[in-house]
Image: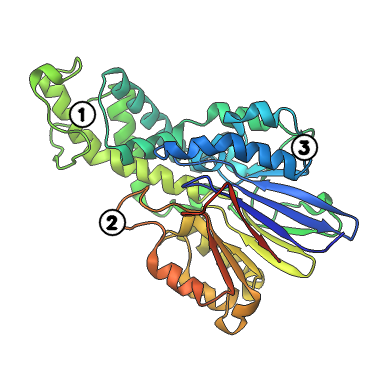
Amino acid sequence: MSATIDIRAYVVGFGDCILLSLPEGTKKKRHVLIDFGRAPNDAVSLERFPAIAEDIHERCNGHLDLIVVTHEHLDHLEGFYRERAIFDTMTVDQVWMSLPSDPNYYRDYPKAKPAKKLREAIGAFAAHAAAKGIAFHPAFQSLIENNLSNKDRIDYLRKLGKKKPMYLSRGSSVASWSSSIKIRVLAPEKDMSVYYGKSAQAHALAASFAASFTVAPGLGDDGFQWDFKSVPRAKSDELGGFSATDFDRLRRAIREDGVAAARFIDKAQNNTSLCLLIEVAGKRLLLPGDAELESWEQIRKHCKADLAKPVDFLKVAHHGSHNGTPTDALDDLLPVARAKKAKILVSTKKNVYGTKNPVPDESLMTDLKRRCTELVTTDGAVGTYVDLSL
């Protein structure tokens, strides 16, 4: 058996789906599937899902040694549930998830509750708006769905493995998984409030948004100022059951609290991403999920030795966004002098989220290209997947 490391990145649009085939000694390979999802406003990508699931089944001969779900965003997990007819026929030894996916997480880490309260409030707000027939801007709607529509998916994944799922955080012991494949968990921190605890914004958002939409759904403060285009002004006969006054209050509340709250939740979830450093066959692979700069700050604080050495493979965080990679860390991880020995993967799709800070970030991509011998992106790829080998 070859000691080659095979990396297959599936073309899921704006999302992640990566199959690692890792050599264990010289006799076999272990198959690790990291994420399977796509952004809610990237509907065309759904057409590829059945072929992707079938290829995963064929590639690993119906047996996955491990499924890793980095965090609870649809662009990282929707495919497992959507293609469960195929996954139900497979043997999955175990599922790893980020610690905040533990059903008892908020009981054990009460400081993280502002994120939970916000999530519940946004869910109530979204349901109320939907019932009233209010249509949001597609990007805002996608932001909400990506963060909320996942309970069924997570419940399914919890039951998918033969062994009980493991909920991991920095320093979790996973040594028993393999004797020859070393995996270190660099993130997330156990208490996710470390990523936002210093800011009063989290608590203010939780209080104001929850008050607006949990207690009295759809109503905001009369003092809010309005300048948000996602919900256009409507004539009196187009309000879907709202009074004109309540409709204006809804629009003001979205502008003042809704967008900020949704973005806060999105960032909080990204920073719960599992970040794995895999050492196998003499190579170092770094896969940080959607970690944003707040998570990287903690990784660099607590895992200095792990980041001080170059990596042979990097899965670029957060689809190549401007806030997903600390560029000043690249000189250690991907030194230019070692470019011929490094390969990089960016799972992304252009023009899915926003224009203010487009993803992927062009300046980051330019910098990455000079640090590797091969940069592979799923954006614009022809076919179901792209392959890399080390």
Determine the residue located farthest toward the right in the rendered image. Answer: 27
Q: Nearer the viewer, residue 169 or 10?
A: 10
Which residue is the site of mark 3? 62
The structure residue drawn at horizontal position 41% and vertical position 55%, both measured from the top left corner, is 198
In the displayed structure, does residue 336 sit left or right of residue 251? right
Q: Position of residue 17 (x, y in %)?
A: 59, 47
First in residue order: circle 3 vs circle 2: 3
Q: Relative to 61, say whether 332 is above or below.
A: below
Find out whether the residues at labels 2 and 1 contact each other: C-beta distance under 8 Å: no
Q: Amino acid at mark 3?
A: Gly
Q: Position of residue 321 (x, y in %)?
A: 42, 58
Q: Amino acid at mark 2?
A: Lys
**Quadrant in the picture for residue 303:** bottom right
Residue 45's disc is none
Which residue is the site of mark 1? 250
Q: Relative to 242, say whether 317 is above or below.
A: below
Measure the alpha-carbon separation of dots 1 and 3: 49 Å
Q: Nearer the viewer, mark 2 or mark 1?
A: 2
Q: Secondary structure at mark 1?
A: helix
| Residue 152 in view | yes
Measure the alpha-carbon separation of dots 2 and 1: 25 Å
Mark 2 Cα within 10 Å, few/some/many (few <14, many 20+)? few
First in residue order: circle 1 vs circle 3: 3
